[in-house]
Image (cartoon, rainbow, N blue to C red):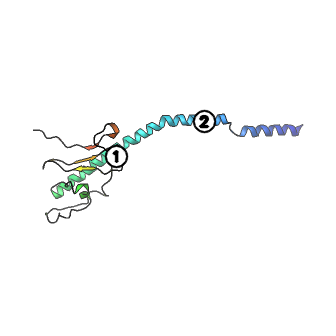
Amino acid sequence: MLVMRRRRTARARTAERGFSLLEVLIVLTIIALVAALVGPRLIAQLDRSKVTAARVQVRALTSALETLRLDLGRYPTADEGLHLLVQAPASAADAGEVWQGPYLETDVPDDPWGRPYAYQPPAEPEGRPTVVSLGADGREGGAGLAADVGLARPTSRG
């Protein structure tokens, strides 16, 4: 009798050790619901952080361009582009320009979406250049997270 009682209790303990299929399915459903609610918010936050990173990089590039202008007396041409911030122009010595660079610690960064920044020299001698990231869609214009990120040229008043 004592032996039978021990067998029953051993069987009862064995049956209690694991989870039933229903319990596992309930836990998986809860995890899926939490992921469905939190996932889109995390993705949206990642997109917003890319826009913020692009704004910071545009400001840093613009600041480096201002420092370069103080040294050379001009902004880079369209052909020279932003690479003039890290590499001296071949014509600098001939023109009497004093390139004091590099003006960036590393090479010119790509925007957070992996594309190069667009650079346009100033249209007027007193104007300022434009540095722009084309945003998430990689095309001019756009709205929301796909909007261009950069400092626009000030409009001339007259």
| Three-letter code for the amino acid on which mark 1 is drawn | Ala
Q: Nearer the viewer, residue 83 or 49?
A: 83
Measured as percent of width and height from the top left, residue 80 is found at 22, 57
Of labels 1 and 2, earlier in sequence is 2
Residue at 17%, 55% in the rendered image: 70
Residue corresponding to mark 2? 27
The number of discs equals: 2
Q: Marks 1 and 2, how far apart in space? A: 38 Å
Which image quadrant is residue 156 in? top left
Which image quadrant is residue 150 in? top left
> Where does the C terminus fall, quadrant-wise?
top left
Residue at 56%, 37% in the rendered image: 31
What is the secondary structure assignment of the residue under circle 1? helix
Q: Is residue 101 above or below residue 11?
A: below
Residue corresponding to mark 1? 53
Q: CB atoms at circles 1 and 2 under 8 Å apart?
A: no
- The dot on residue 133 is none
User: Along the horizontal axis of the image, is 129 left or right of 26?
Assistant: left
> Where does the N terminus fall, quadrant-wise?
top right
Which image quadrant is residue 69 in? bottom left
Q: Nearer the viewer, residue 115 or 57?
A: 115
